[in-house]
Amino acid sequence: MQYLHTMVRVSDLDASLHFYCDLLGLKEVRRKENEKGRFTLVFLAAPEDEARSTELQAPELELTWNWDPEAYTGGRNFGHLAYRVDDIYALCEKLQAGGVTINRPPRDGHMAFVRSPDGISVELLQKGDALPPKEPWVSMDNTGTW
């Protein structure tokens, strides 16, 4: 068995690509437009997974954008996506500067949670050992649900 991808439906493809690519750092590896089905599939890979994605089409995140507007009410039963990151503080600063709320700040230098424009919970985990505690993260409270 091999893990291939996780699919999430998105209501605004441009906002989602800005979040996942420009802010979070994923790379678009391929895109499929389906005129008959009226949807677009965009496959993303983490930078360290890009070569495997090219070779195996895995592991990836699949964004599904239905052209006809549809309201999505995500549930916590989905859980979350998780990514290992090189510097959790730097990424959280970048996300925050891009207007993303840090729902669970990286107070411990190890873990943080944010949400995509469609409310998908994304867990960020520090690569290797936790970074030393650092402000402003140590003093920040949780915001919303994560």
Image (cartoon, rainbow, N blue to C red):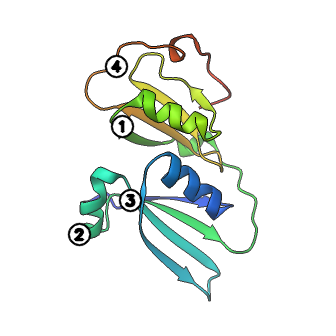
Image side of residue 59 versus residue 13, left or right:
left
User: Disc 3 versus disc 4: distance between alpha carbons?
Assistant: 27 Å
Mark 2 is on which residue type?
Glu
Query: Considering depth in this image, is 94 or 58 the residue closer to the camera?
Result: 94
Mark 2 lies on residue: 55
Q: Amino acid at mark 4?
A: Leu
Residue contact at pointers 2 and 1, CB within 8 angstroms: no
Q: Secondary structure at mark 2?
A: helix
Q: Amino acid at mark 1?
A: Val
- As drawn, the label of residue 60 is 3
| The image quarter in which residue 57 lies | bottom left
The Cα–Cα distance between marks 2 and 3, rounded to whole angstroms, is 12 Å
Q: Amino acid at mark 3?
A: Glu
Q: Is residue 137 above or below residue 145?
A: above
Residue at 66% x, 25% y: name it: 143
Looking at the image, residue 10 sits to the left or right of residue 28; the answer is right
Nearer to us in this view, 41 or 29: 29
Callout 1 environment at 10 Å: few (<14), some (14 to 19), or many (20+)?
many
Q: Position of residue 78 (x, y in %)?
A: 55, 46
Mark drawn on residue 131? 4
Q: Secondary structure at mark 1?
A: strand
